Image (cartoon, rainbow, N blue to C red):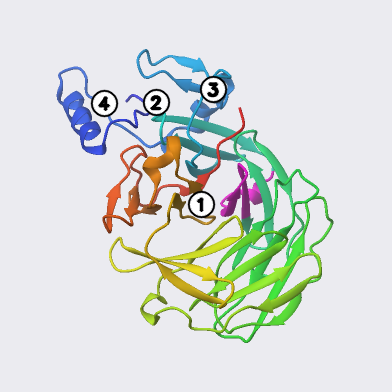
């Protein structure tokens, strides 16, 4: 059996599968392709000691080459696949997929703290991940293998995010718990280095489940089932419900809202039907969501944290697109053609594979 430690993302899935079938059919060349997650931990340890993240595979020679200061990629998020390994110690396995360079980088790092095993990703911003397991949460930078632990939280929150780079004194973590079964909701905040979260505060809620949270200009905005929008001002610790409830068509209630922020503007995106999407922009004067049929010079990347990317100049090819994860592929929906298309520059993964999120590239 041969382990393939490089990925050629420039080929589409069918070409790769045909090539593998051809190789396996050649006499003396039979091999089985296996997932990274099935590689024995000992083998990863050996490889991990020889590699670091800023090395990549040269497509022509298959040799490891360092990424120099002239390495460039477009300012769009990378695709991160993350999973955990455990053999008495905890390991973080990350596969980074660059959309334009058609390159994949794999890291496998030991993590101190068995309690972190199987933590799930809640947010991805500034190249950092916010992960949660039960009432425990922590920041993790997969590029540097840095961990910043947070105090235990006394509520099982629905959604959480953060405002700035975790190493910045301006970083504030925000957690919210809200349910359709209760007219009350609970909010809590903390900063890295705090010994405990702020006292969990109970507010009157819209009696809806919170679906997404974003941060903008000192305020955390929360969108609930049906489109109700609330705001929590960090400086004054003040909560307000900005709208009424049931602002969007009821047919979309079964679809989770993804909220996107860009320069003070807010959008919510819903999946409608099979691989189709509807987009609403918040009208601050009317305090209502207006359906929109174009993004302009923007592209949206939907995940636990969603990103808005400028689509001008070098990135103009991304304009009017919504990128999302679906089954075994990452895909995009074009607001121009009203159709979804498979992303050939992101790899195919198994349905029960690792978590997939968008992550902002490191500063190299």
Q: How many neighbours does mark 2 have within 10 angstroms: few (below 14), some (14-19), or many (20 or more)? A: some
Circle 4 sits on which residue? Answer: 31
* Stretch in magenta: 113-131
Circle 1 sits on which residue? Answer: 308
Q: Is residue 101 above or below residue 286?
A: above
Q: Between tags 3 and 2, which lies in front?
A: 2
Q: Secondary structure at mark 4?
A: loop
Q: Between tags 4 and 1, which lies in front?
A: 1
Q: Is residue 162 above or below residue 165?
A: below
Q: Is residue 88 above or below residue 201?
A: above
Q: Secondary structure at mark 2?
A: loop
Q: Between tags 3 and 1, which lies in front?
A: 1
Q: What is the x, y in percent for residue 341? A: 28, 49
Separation of residues labelled 3 and 2 (CA atoms): 16 Å
Disc number placed over residue 46 in the picture, else none: 3
* Whether residue 87 can be seen here: no
Per the image, is 125 magenta? Answer: yes
For the residues bearing labels 4 and 2, Cβ distance under 8 angstroms: no
| Quadrant (top left, top right, bottom left, bottom right) of the C terminus | top right
Circle 2 sits on which residue? Answer: 6
Q: What is the x, y in percent for residue 42? A: 52, 28
Separation of residues labelled 3 and 4 (CA atoms): 22 Å
Image side of residue 341 versus residue 233, left or right? left
Residue name at image x 50 percent, y 44 percent: 82
Q: What is the x, y in percent for residue 113? A: 69, 45
């Amino acid at each position: 059996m041969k382990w393939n430690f490089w990925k050629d993302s420039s080929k589409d899935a069918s070409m790769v599968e045909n090539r593998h079938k051809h190789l396996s059919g050649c006499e003396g060349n039979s091999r089985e392709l296996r997932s990274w997650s099935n590689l024995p931990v000992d083998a990863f340890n050996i490889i991990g000691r020889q590699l670091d993240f800023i090395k990549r595979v040269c497509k022509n020679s298959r040799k490891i080459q360092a990424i120099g200061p002239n390495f460039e990629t477009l300012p769009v998020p990378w695709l991160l696949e993350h999973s955990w390994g455990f053999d008495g110690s905890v390991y973080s396995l990350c596969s980074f997929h660059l959309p334009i360079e058609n390159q994949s980088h794999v890291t496998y790092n030991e993590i101190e703290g068995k309690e972190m095993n199987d933590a799930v990703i809640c947010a991805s911003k500034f190249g950092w991940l916010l992960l949660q397991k039960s009432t425990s949460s922590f920041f993790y930078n997969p590029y540097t293998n840095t961990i910043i632990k947070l105090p235990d939280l006394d509520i099982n929150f629905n959604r959480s995010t953060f405002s700035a780079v975790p190493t910045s004194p301006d970083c504030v973590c925000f957690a919210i718990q809200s349910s359709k079964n209760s007219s009350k909701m609970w909010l809590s905040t903390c900063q890295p280095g705090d010994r405990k979260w702020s006292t969990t505060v109970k507010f009157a809620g819209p009696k809806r489940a919170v679906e997404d949270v974003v941060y903008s200009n000192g305020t955390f905005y929360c969108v609930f089932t049906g489109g109700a929008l609330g705001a929590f001002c960090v400086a004054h610790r003040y909560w307000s419900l900005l709208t009424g409830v049931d602002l969007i068509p009821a047919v979309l209630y079964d679809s989770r809202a993804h909220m996107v922020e860009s320069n003070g503007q807010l959008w919510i995106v819903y999946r409608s039907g099979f691989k189709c999407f509807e987009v609403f922009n918040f009208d601050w004067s009317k305090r209502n969501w207006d359906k929109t049929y174009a993004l302009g010079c923007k592209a949206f990347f939907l995940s636990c944290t969603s990103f808005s990317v400028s689509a001008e100049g070098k990135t103009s090819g991304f304009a009017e697109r919504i990128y999302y994860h679906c089954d075994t592929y990452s895909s995009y929906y074009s607001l121009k053609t009203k159709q979804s298309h498979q992303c050939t520059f992101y790899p195919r993964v198994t349905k029960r594979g690792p978590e997939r999120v968008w992550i902002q590239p490191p500063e190299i």
